[in-house]
Image (cartoon, rainbow, N blue to C red):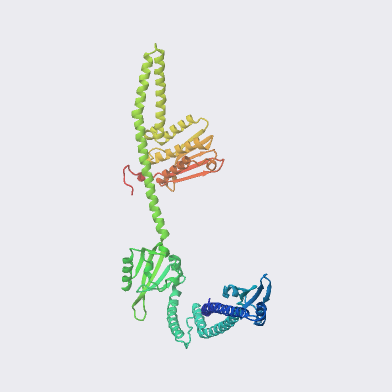
């Protein structure tokens, strides 16, 4: 909605409100006037008829004939209708209709709005009655004609006034078009455009301000264009600001890095990019620039749009005026090193997590070893003692069958408990791993697996020297094989299992390779239980904690293959002593 239309709309609303107020006053005055006129006419009519009726009693002849002749000569009394009825209720006389503006009527809504509520008056006479009915239709029509003339006059005034205001405003606002055209030219980069002086003082002030702004923009644009030619295509963010920190140049790389467009940042303070806590660093850099010193390869942080912090490598140099040889600003070159810093942090966290995992595994193995030792030394001896006592009782009670049977039952239960305890001990900590080495411990574990699962053909192949590999490597390789065999028995529905452990050289360094495969359903068709997922995760964590590699391959219906590579050269040094602090 433009200014001309708004002003015309305001004038129209004011005229409409004024018309409504005046019309309401006129309608109210007309209503009161008509009421007073009709009431006065009613009084006059009643006085006239009363006088005639009284006088007709003293005139010769029948009184009714005298009154009827009088009514015929009278016709109507102003705006009142007269009706004469005899003693039987028959209409004897009815006054003729009014000839004033006959055939015309005011609109029904206007009649209902302005007509007063008047009652008919009944006069009783000897031998009949006279009804006096007020009729305000002619007065209402007069009021309607007066109001219509006024409305037409207001409408003509409304049209004339709006037309004149519209034309005058169009003439007065003609400079606005030139101002808008000048702004459009400046928006397209034509800073040489200027506005003429306008006769109206307001537009004259706008013209002078516009021209001063155009001069300043033209000068600033010329300077910035020279600088932009140098750094426009740079992949690094280049920012130039004066000694007060106000940005005067902002290249596209800076837009991409910090999220502010040139229009948003130019002229604003560069402190917008300073994160909380680094104000002193920025002040020190600016002080160095003022002393014509250079800041090189400073790893710091800056704040992008929305409060996002960006790690950057900063290089800054002073901007020197060639004529005065004075520092007039600072040229900053910034490169985003967020990804590099994150990679460094991720590498550190990965190493810490691996050492933490290794420490947890060492503590876990120590706890298992302690539990196995307690089971072997305490529970094993107790079960052996129970078995010995039961055997002695059985040998001494051959003549008492019931006691002998009970004693032998005790011996059988004790033997079963002994076997179960030794099985638990092997699961917790195989004794062969501590006393004989990895190869013997694996052979013992595979033989036990074959006894428990005779329907699964289990093949074990050992290559190379598997002695003196170190505690961490031995237990990791053993647990990988143990977990894989557990998964084969529980989840794979396989009939064959292949285990290969060998020592090899890789890029001149010794490694231990552990591979386990089966011919089962494969990982894709297995039930993804928590145990299966955490078992694979535990194997991976164990191997990676020793800086090793863990891979698995599986196809539905073709089994699962697990391969772990553990570096032997680094494994002794990578062992964290029990109780050592986590870095």
Q: Farthest residue in the bottom direction?
A: 199
Q: Which residue is depicted at the point 35% across and 38% down?
A: 366
Task: Answer yes or no: is residue 344 visible.
Answer: yes
Q: Farthest residue in the top direction?
A: 399
For residue 312, above or below residue 450: below
Where is residue 1? Give x, y as percent. 53, 76
Task: Answer yes or no: is residue 95 visible.
Answer: no
Q: Which residue is depicted at the point 37% across and 49% down?
A: 352
Q: Quadrant of residue 202?
A: bottom left
Where is residue 174? Give x, y as percent. 52, 84
Q: Quadrant of residue 537?
A: top left
The one nearer the camera, 272 or 294, is 272
Is residue 62 rendered to the left or right of residue 340? right
For residue 70, above or below residue 354: below
Q: Which residue is depicted at the point 34% across and 81% down?
A: 324
The one nearer the camera, 42 or 11, is 42
For residue 259, above or below residue 553: below
The one nearer the camera, 308 or 499, is 308
The one nearer the camera, 142 or 283, is 142
């Amino acid at each position: 909605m433009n200014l001309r239309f708004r002003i015309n709309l305001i004038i129209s609303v004011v005229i409409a409100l004024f018309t409504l107020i005046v019309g309401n006053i006129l309608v109210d005055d007309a209503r009161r006037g008509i009421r007073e006129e009709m009431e006065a006419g009613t009084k006059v009519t009643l006085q006239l008829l009363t006088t005639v009726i009284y006088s007709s009693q003293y005139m010769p002849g029948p009184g009714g004939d005298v009154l009827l002749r009088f009514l015929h000569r009278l016709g109507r009394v102003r705006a009142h209708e007269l009706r004469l009825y005899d003693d039987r209720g028959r209409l004897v006389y009815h006054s003729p209709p009014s000839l004033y503006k006959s055939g015309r009527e005011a609109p029904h809504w206007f009649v209902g709005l302005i007509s007063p509520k008047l009652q008919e008056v009944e006069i009783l006479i000897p031998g009949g009655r006279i009804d006096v009915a007020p009729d305000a239709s002619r007065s209402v029509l007069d009021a309607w004609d007066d109001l219509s003339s006024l409305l037409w006059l207001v409408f003509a005034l409304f049209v004339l006034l709006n037309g004149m205001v519209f034309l005058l405003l169009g003439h007065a606002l003609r400079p606005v078009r030139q101002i808008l055209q000048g702004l459009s030219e400046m928006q397209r980069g034509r800073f040489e455009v200027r506005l003429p002086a306008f006769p109206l003082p307001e537009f004259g002030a706008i013209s002078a301000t516009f021209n001063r702004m155009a001069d300043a923009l033209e000068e600033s644009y010329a300077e910035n264009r020279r600088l932009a030619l140098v750094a426009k295509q740079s992949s690094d963010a280049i920012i130039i600001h004066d000694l007060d920190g106000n940005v005067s140049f902002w290249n596209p790389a800076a837009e991409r890095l910090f999220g502010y467009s040139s229009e948003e940042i130019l002229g604003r303070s560069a402190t917008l990019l300073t994160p909380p806590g680094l104000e002193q660093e920025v002040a020190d850099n600016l002080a160095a620039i003022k002393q014509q010193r250079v800041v090189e390869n400073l790893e710091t942080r800056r704040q992008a749009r929305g409060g996002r912090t960006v790690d950057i490598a900063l290089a800054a140099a002073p901007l020197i005026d060639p004529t005065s040889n004075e520092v007039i600003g600072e040229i900053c070159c910034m490169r985003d090193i967020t990804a590099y810093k994150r990679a460094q942090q991720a590498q550190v966290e990965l190493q810490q997590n691996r050492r933490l995992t290794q420490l947890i595994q060492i503590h876990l193995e120590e706890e298992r070893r302690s539990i196995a030792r307690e089971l072997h030394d305490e529970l094993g001896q107790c079960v052996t003692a129970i078995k010995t006592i039961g055997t002695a009782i059985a040998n001494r009670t051959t003549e008492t069958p019931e006691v002998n049977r009970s004693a032998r039952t005790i011996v059988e239960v004790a033997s079963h408990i002994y076997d179960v305890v030794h099985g638990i001990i092997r699961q917790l900590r195989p004794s062969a791993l501590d006393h004989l080495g990895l190869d013997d411990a694996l052979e013992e574990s595979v033989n036990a697996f074959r006894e428990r699962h005779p329907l699964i053909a289990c093949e074990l192949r050992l290559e190379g020297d598997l002695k003196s590999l170190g505690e961490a490597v031995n237990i990791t390789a053993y647990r990988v094989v143990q977990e894989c065999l557990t998964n084969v028995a529980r989840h794979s529905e396989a009939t064959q299992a292949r285990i290969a452990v060998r020592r090899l050289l890789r890029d001149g360094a010794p490694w231990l390779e552990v591979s386990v495969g089966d011919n089962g359903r494969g990982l894709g068709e297995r039930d993804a239980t928590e145990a299966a997922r955490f078992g694979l995760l535990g194997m991976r964590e164990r191997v990676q904690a020793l800086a090793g590699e863990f891979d698995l391959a599986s196809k539905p219906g073709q089994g699962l293959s697990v391969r772990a590579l553990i570096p032997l050269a680094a494994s002794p040094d990578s062992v964290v002593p029990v109780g050592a602090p986590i870095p």
